[in-house]
């Protein structure tokens, strides 16, 4: 087996570089991973979650190999892998899960108890997420392979839809989970905060779940145009005006049934203050704009430490929320990592049977590994694109 590998490395705020890195081993430090496989990465996506680290808004150390959205070909199986075979084309849930702990047994794979000594839940290439190497690389190790991996039924057929299937590792399940936990169903009216890739994936998911009307809000016109391209209504939040009034113009009502926060802690204020950060603004809008008894899905990421926050409370993740309003309206809130495994198989089937065009909706843009630093910069600049790295040129071929 070749010993060469390259990957995207976080170098410090605003900087990533493509560097030579070690070829993966079936181990994490002293911990043996005979249950793992080594993948030849076919596609690996850049995520808004990576940007929190690259913007210096987390405690991520310099030298971290990035990437948690991975699709690959199995190159090598550990001794204890029983059902996954070399040559299988597989989607990797971004959550690392052991399949043995109480939470995994209950399907809560985003908060596995055995994969991160410092807190429940782990991911590849992410700060505080257990130290597992990232997958914006040529090769990566995936532990507990029989449990974690989703094998595509036919590799050739899958390569034809790889632009869509690559989104099963995170944003499609995440957007779908946001809608499910917001209670979206046939006939729902839905507000999606954020028209980044997760927001657009949530909007497609709301449509797939039968929503009557999906409204997407953001400050970036190009991203809102993307949402309109597949039938969403949009709110340009750089404009002045009460959000409830603007929702009433669209729905004839001032509240929605379901609200999904696809922004997180780096939220910006609306209207004339739209350049300024206001970390609780989406959560507060959720409570004012969701009907009494409604549900609020919060896939947008909130952190326990934010060294770049504007005030001391926010530096500890403490936000100024009008929680009493949510209480008065009997709202339900659902937070946390999406348990990808709960959704990836049915969403794969929806893609393979042509029921959904998720890649077009989020505007997938394929790039090479060497173009990753530019992909990060363009994405940070608000491009209405989901950047997908093709590290071996296998998709281009
Ligand atoms: N829970 C999970 O499992 C999970 C998985 C993937 C991503 N995430 C998180 O989801 C969030 C979105 O990810 P992404 O890749 O789409 O990121 P992104 O940064 O591309 O998108 C965020 C969008 O929110 C917009 N925005 C800022 N303030 C706003 C406001 N007040 N109202 C509406 N829109 C506003 C921004 O202009 C931007 O377009 C991130 O916080 C990411 O970390 C969570
Ligand atoms: Zn992601
Ligand atoms: Zn577990």
Image: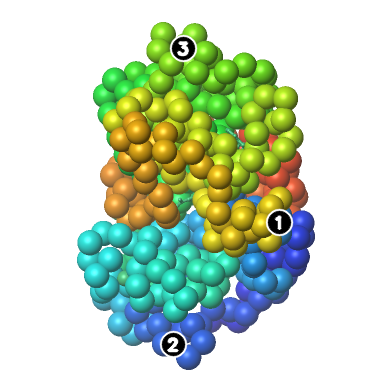
SS assignment at label 2 = strand
Quick check: is the Cβ at mark 2 less than 8 Å away from ligand 3? no
Residue at 53% from the left image edge and 75% from the top image edge = 131
Q: Earlier in the sequence, mark 1 or mark 3?
A: 3
**Is 227 situated above or below 378?**
above
| Marks 1/3: CA–CA distance | 36 Å
Q: Residue furthest bottom?
A: 30
**Is 256 situated above or below 251?**
below
Q: In this orientation, which residue lies closer to the viewer: 393 or 240?
A: 240
- For label 2, the residue is 31
Q: Nearer the viewer, mark 2 or mark 3?
A: 3
Q: Position of residue 84 (x, y in %)?
A: 31, 69
Q: Position of residue 136 (x, y in %)?
A: 59, 62
Residues packed near mark 1 inside 10 Å, few (<14), some (14 to 19) or many (20 plus): some
**Is 360 situated above or below 4?**
above
The answer to whether residue 251 of the structure is visible from this angle is no
- For label 3, the residue is 248
**Residues at marks 2 and 3 touching, judged by CB atoms closer than 8 Å:** no
Q: How many marks?
A: 3
The quarter of the displayed image where residue 16 is located: bottom right
Q: Earlier in the sequence, mark 2 or mark 3?
A: 2
Q: Earlier in the sequence, mark 1 or mark 2?
A: 2
Residues packed near mark 2 inside 10 Å, few (<14), some (14 to 19) or many (20 plus): few
**In the image: residue 141, left or right of residue 107:** right
Residue at 75% from the left image edge and 65% from the top image edge = 12
**Is 37 situated above or below 300?**
below
SS assignment at label 1 = loop
Q: Position of residue 135 (x, y in %)?
A: 55, 64
Q: Which mark is residue 308?
A: 1
**In the image: residue 132, left or right of residue 296:** right
């Amino acid at each position: 087996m070749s010993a060469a590998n390259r990957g995207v490395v976080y170098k410090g705020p605003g900087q990533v570089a493509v560097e030579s890195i070690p070829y993966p081993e079936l181990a994490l430090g002293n911990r043996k991973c005979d249950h793992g496989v080594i993948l030849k990465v076919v596609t690996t996506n850049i995520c808004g979650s990576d940007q929190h680290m690259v913007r210096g808004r987390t405690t991520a150390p310099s030298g971290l190999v990035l990437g948690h959205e991975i699709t690959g070909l199995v190159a090598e199986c550990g001794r204890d892998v029983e059902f996954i075979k070399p040559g299988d084309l597989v989607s990797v849930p971004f959550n690392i899960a052991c399949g043995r702990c109480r939470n995994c047994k209950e399907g809560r794979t985003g908060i596995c108890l055995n994969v991160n000594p410092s807190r429940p839940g782990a991911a590849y290439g992410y700060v505080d997420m257990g130290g597992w190497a990232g997958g914006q690389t040529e090769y990566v190790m995936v532990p507990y392979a029989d449990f974690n991996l989703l094998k595509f039924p036919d590799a050739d057929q899958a390569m034809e839809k790889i632009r869509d299937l690559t989104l099963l590792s995170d944003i499609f399940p995440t957007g779908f989970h946001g809608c499910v936990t917001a209670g979206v169903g046939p006939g729902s009216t839905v507000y999606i905060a954020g028209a980044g890739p997760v927001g657009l994936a949530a909007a497609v998911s709301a449509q797939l779940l039968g929503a009557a009307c999906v409204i997407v809000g953001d400050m970036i016109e190009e991203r809102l145009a993307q949402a309109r391209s597949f039938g969403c209504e949009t709110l340009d939040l750089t404009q002045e005006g009460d959000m409830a009034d603007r929702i009433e113009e669209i729905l004839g009502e001032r509240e929605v049934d379901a609200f999904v926060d696809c922004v997180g802690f780096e939220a910006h204020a609306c209207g004339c203050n739209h350049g300024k950060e206001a970390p609780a603004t989406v959560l507060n809008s959720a409570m004012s704009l969701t009907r009494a008894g409604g549900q609020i899905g919060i896939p947008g990421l909130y952190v326990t430490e934010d060294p770049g926050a504007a005030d001391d409370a926010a530096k500890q993740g403490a936000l100024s929320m009008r929680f009493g309003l949510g209480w008065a309206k009997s709202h339900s809130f659902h937070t946390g990592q999406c348990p990808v495994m709960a959704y990836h198989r049915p969403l794969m089937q929806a893609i393979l049977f042509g029921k959904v065009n998720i890649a077009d909706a989020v505007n997938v843009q394929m790039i090479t590994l060497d173009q990753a630093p530019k992909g990060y910069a363009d994405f940070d600049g608000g491009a209405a694109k989901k950047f997908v790295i093709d590290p071996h040129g296998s998709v281009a071929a």
